[in-house]
Amino acid sequence: MPASTLVSSVSTVDVAAGDRLAFWEHYNAHALVGLTCSSYEDEGLLARQVNLELDGVRVADIAGNAHVVERAPGLVRSQPKDATFVSTLLEGEAFFHSAGGTVHLRAGDLLVYATDRPYLFGFGTAMRQVLVDVPRPLFAERCGVADLSRPVKVAGSGEGAAGLAVRALSRRLLGLVDDPAHTPVAAQAAARDELLELMRTALTGTGSAAGTSHLLAAKEHIHARLQDPGLCGDQVARAVGVTVRHLNRAFATEGTTVAQYVQGRRLDCARVDLTATSMAGSRIADVAARWGFASQAHFTRLFRARFGCTPSEVRPPRAAEVRPPRAAEVTGG
């Protein structure tokens, strides 16, 4: 049985400015990979890192100010590591230089590269990335990519199954690193397999027969377009690159269908609006239309079926209206 998901957490904030680079290099040599680090900021390197373990796969949440890390040929030889790194850049801009050329990254992009080849990874602004450290044989077997002589970039803004998978992967990784205790030990292998399948879809456009990547990619597409009145099962399936029948089989593992999931998410969002004091002045019909319901009566029936009450019954009491005084009250008459 593996140990706890959370492996370690460090920060350079409390380290003397002159010692921060050496501290960071020493930590990464043990936690991830041997590298050298440079920073040209007045305050030096300000960075923090959280490392999680998912049944043989390491997940590292790294944030910091502008800096550069390099894995030079000497380090590749003296501190060998045969792994594939999958980096999702969440914040900032970056560039990656290797013998395969230079790749420029924006927030949302995915980069895949090998640790047995020299590289330079530079961050010109404050940054945050979540890096997944996968043993090379496991990555080749599960993700369908064996040749990483050149780094592979997948734009997070892209359409189709690949772009959706990148965004779903970023969301899944954020959920893991923001609340590591939420992933019990027994679920580590399942979480690892989800990540690997999303990586496969991002890199090849296909997933396994289990359909987990299609399910997560479909949810990502739905999340981004929930207010689109044209959102339907056919549209979601086309975006993911499968048939509606195939996608419904994936949703069936959660006891639902694509259409039922869309309807449920819309009702949940409408309920949030209806219970928000900031939305107290909005009409129920307006809230229903905002979330894709054609009529208030239809919306009310579905709302009652899901929550056991009507939309009006969940609304907070409105503040008492202040009535302007009558002329007689002002004059004392």
Image (cartoon, grey):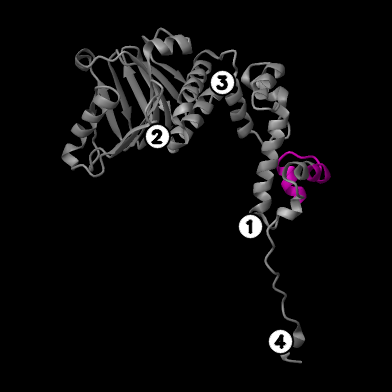
Q: Earlier in the sequence, mark 2 or mark 3?
A: 2
Q: Amino acid at mark 3?
A: Ser
- Seen in the picture, residue 292 relative to 246 is either above or below; the reply is below
Circle 3 crowding by C-alpha within 10 Å: few under 14, some 14–19, many from 20: many
Q: Which element is circle 2 on?
A: loop
Which residue is denoted by mark 1 in the rendering? 277
Which residue is denoted by mark 4 in the rendering? 330
Task: Reply yes or no: does residue 298 show up in magenta.
Answer: yes
Could you say which quadrant of the image residue 256 lies in? top right
Circle 1 crowding by C-alpha within 10 Å: few under 14, some 14–19, many from 20: some
Q: Amino acid at mark 2?
A: Gly
Q: Which element is circle 4 on?
A: helix
Could you tell whether 329 is left or right of 63 in the image?
right
Residue 242 image position (x, y, % from top left):
65, 16
Q: Residue at x 69, y 51 (%)?
A: 274
Q: Residue at x 51, y 24 (%)?
A: 166
Which residue is denoted by mark 2 in the rendering? 92
Could you say which quadrant of the image residue 4 lies in? top left
